Image: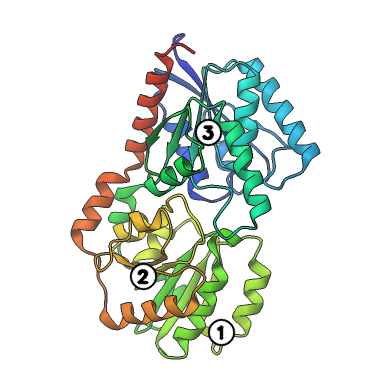
C-alpha cells in the first residue's frame, strides 16, 4: 500500500451537476490498491454532505468560490498551495474554471510532479463580452502552461482549445463524462410522477433538467413552452433544477398563457425514474462540455431537442435520438418540439447501444487510472 499514488482532485463547488457528480464517483471508485484519493472543494454545495460521507480525506476551502473576488481568490490560492505542500500529492487533478486556474497555479508553486485538468466545458463562451472573454482566456493560458495533461469531454471543446492556444505544450486526451448506463437503461415508465403532480394520463410531457444559470438559458425553455402550449393543449412541461435564475423564471412562468401546465420541481435525485415518463427532453444551453443528461435521456428511450453547440452535436444524431435547435431561439425550439411530438419520435436502439458503450461511468474511471499511471511513469 505504500507505493500508492496520491491523487488530489480539486473542484470549485460541489453543486448537483455532472462534473461534480463524476468527480465524487471518481474519487470514491479509484482502485485503492494503487491510488490514495483526496478531494478538495469550496463549501456550500448540495453535494457537500455526500462528499463528507465518502471514505476518503475531504478538504474544504472556504475561500474557494465561483465569483471573481481578488482577496478571496488569493486566500484560496494560498490555502491550496499550503495544502499541496503538506499533502505532497503525486498528481493534482483539477475541475471547473476557478479551481482549475487557482488549483493548477498552486500545484505548480508547491512543486507537484504531475498536474492534470479536465475541461467539462469552459468558463468563457461565444456569447460573452470580449473583455471578460479574453481575461478568462489569458487566465486559462497561464494555467495551461503549468499543466502536463488536459482532458476534454468533447471533441468540439478540444478543437476550440487548440484554436485558443490552450493546448500548447500539454498532452491531451478525450475521456467522456460517464453516466450510470445500466441505471438509466433499466429505468421503466411508472405513473408516480403523474400522480404526484396531477398530470392526466393522456397528457404528453416535455421536460428540461439543468441548473438554472445563464449557461443553461432556461428562459428559452419557458418561452418555447409557452409557444407550444398555445398550439398543443395536451402537453405539460417539467423543469427540474434550481439556481440563481429561479426568481426570474418564476415570474416568466406566471405570464404564460396557461401556467398551470408548467411544473417546476427544483432539484430531484430520481431523474432516472422521471425521465421515462417524458415524451421529450429539451436542453437550451448556450455552451457545454458534453452534458450527461443527453446520454441519460437517450438510454432511457427519450428523444432530445438540444441547442446546436459544441458537445451537444456529438451526441445528438438527427432523426435517431433527437434534433438540434438554434441557441436563444425559442421559436426554433418550439417548432422542433411540436414536430417531435406530432411525429411521435422514438430513439433508435443502435444509438442507445452506442451511448452504453461510450459513456459508461466505470470506463471513465479506468481511463483516468490508466492516465495517472502513465504520467507517474514519466520524469516529473
Left or right of residue 352, residue 111 in this image: right
Q: Which residue is mark 1?
A: 259
**Circle 3: is it few (<14), some (14-19), or many (20+) Cα within 10 Å?**
some
**Circle 1: is it few (<14), some (14-19), or many (20+) Cα within 10 Å?**
some
Question: In the image, which is nearer the foreground, mark 1 or mark 2?
Answer: 1
51 w.r.t. 182: above or below? above
Q: Which mark is residue 298?
A: none
Q: x%, y% of residue 367?
A: 35, 31
21 w.r.t. 147: above or below? below
Q: If you read the primary sequence from the N terminus, does the residue marked by circle 3 or circle 2 appear first?
A: 3
Q: Which mark is residue 54?
A: 3
- At mark 1, the secondary structure is helix
| Outermost residue toward the right in this view | 71
In front of the other: 134 or 333: 134
Left or right of residue 29, residue 223 in this image: right
What's the residue at 39%, 46% (across, down)?
Answer: 154
Q: If you read the primary sequence from the N terminus, does the residue marked by circle 1 or circle 2 appear first?
A: 1
In front of the other: 118 or 267: 118
Q: How was this image coloured? A: rainbow
Q: x%, y% of residue 7?
A: 51, 23
The quarter of the image holding the N terminus is top left
Callout 3–callout 2 Cβ contact below 8 Å = no
Question: In the image, which is nearer the foreground, mark 3 or mark 1?
Answer: 1
Q: Which mark is residue 277?
A: 2
Callout 3–callout 1 Cβ contact below 8 Å = no
Callout 1–callout 2 Cβ contact below 8 Å = no
322 w.r.t. 176: above or below? below
Quadrant for residue 68, please give it: top right
Quadrant for residue 242, please give it: bottom right
What's the residue at 28%, 55% (across, down)?
Answer: 185
Q: What is the distance, in whole Å, between disc 3 and disc 2 at their CAs?
A: 32 Å
Amino acid at each position: 500500500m505504500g507505493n500508492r499514488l496520491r491523487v488530489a482532485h480539486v473542484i470549485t463547488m460541489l453543486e448537483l451537476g455532472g462534473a461534480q457528480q463524476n468527480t465524487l464517483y471518481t474519487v470514491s471508485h479509484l482502485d485503492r490498491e494503487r491510488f490514495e484519493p483526496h478531494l478538495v472543494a469550496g463549501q456550500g454545495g448540495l453535494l457537500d454532505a455526500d462528499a463528507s460521507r465518502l471514505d476518503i480525506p475531504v478538504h474544504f476551502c472556504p475561500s474557494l468560490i465561483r465569483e471573481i473576488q481578488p482577496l478571496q481568490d488569493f486566500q484560496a490560492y494560498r490555502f491550496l498551495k499550503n495544502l499541496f505542500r503538506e499533502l505532497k500529492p503525486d498528481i493534482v487533478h483539477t475541475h471547473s474554471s476557478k479551481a482549475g486556474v487557482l488549483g493548477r497555479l498552486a500545484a505548480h508553486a508547491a512543486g507537484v510532479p504531475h498536474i492534470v485538468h479536465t475541461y467539462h466545458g469552459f468558463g468563457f463562451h461565444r456569447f460573452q463580452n470580449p473583455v471578460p472573454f479574453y481575461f478568462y482566456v489569458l487566465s486559462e493560458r497561464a494555467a495551461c502552461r503549468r499543466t502536463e495533461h488536459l482532458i476534454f469531454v468533447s471533441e468540439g471543446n478540444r478543437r476550440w482549445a487548440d484554436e485558443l492556444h490552450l493546448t500548447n505544450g500539454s498532452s491531451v486526451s478525450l475521456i467522456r463524462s460517464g453516466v450510470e448506463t445500466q441505471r438509466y437503461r433499466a429505468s421503466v415508465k411508472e405513473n408516480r410522477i403523474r400522480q404526484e403532480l396531477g398530470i392526466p394520463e393522456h397528457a404528453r410531457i416535455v421536460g428540461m433538467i439543468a441548473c438554472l444559470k445563464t449557461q443553461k438559458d432556461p428562459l428559452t425553455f419557458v418561452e418555447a413552452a409557452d409557444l407550444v402550449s398555445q398550439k398543443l393543449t395536451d402537453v405539460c412541461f417539467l423543469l427540474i433544477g434550481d439556481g440563481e435564475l429561479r426568481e426570474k423564471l418564476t415570474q416568466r412562468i406566471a405570464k404564460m398563457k396557461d401556467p398551470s401546465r408548467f411544473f417546476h420541481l427544483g432539484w430531484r435525485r430520481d431523474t432516472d425514474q422521471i425521465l421515462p415518463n417524458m415524451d421529450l427532453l429539451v436542453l437550451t444551453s448556450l455552451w457545454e462540455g458534453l452534458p450527461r443528461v443527453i446520454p441519460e435521456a437517450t438510454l432511457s428511450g427519450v428523444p432530445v431537442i438540444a441547442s446546436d453547440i459544441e458537445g451537444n452535436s456529438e451526441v445528438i444524431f438527427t432523426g435517431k435520438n433527437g434534433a438540434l435547435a438554434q441557441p436563444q431561439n425559442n421559436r426554433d425550439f418550439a417548432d422542433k418540439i411540436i414536430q417531435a411530438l406530432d411525429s411521435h419520435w422514438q430513439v433508435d436502439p443502435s444509438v442507445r447501444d452506442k451511448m452504453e458503450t461510450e459513456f459508461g461511468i466505470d470506463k471513465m474511471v479506468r481511463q483516468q487510472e490508466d492516465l495517472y499511471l502513465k504520467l507517474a511513469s514519466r520524469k516529473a
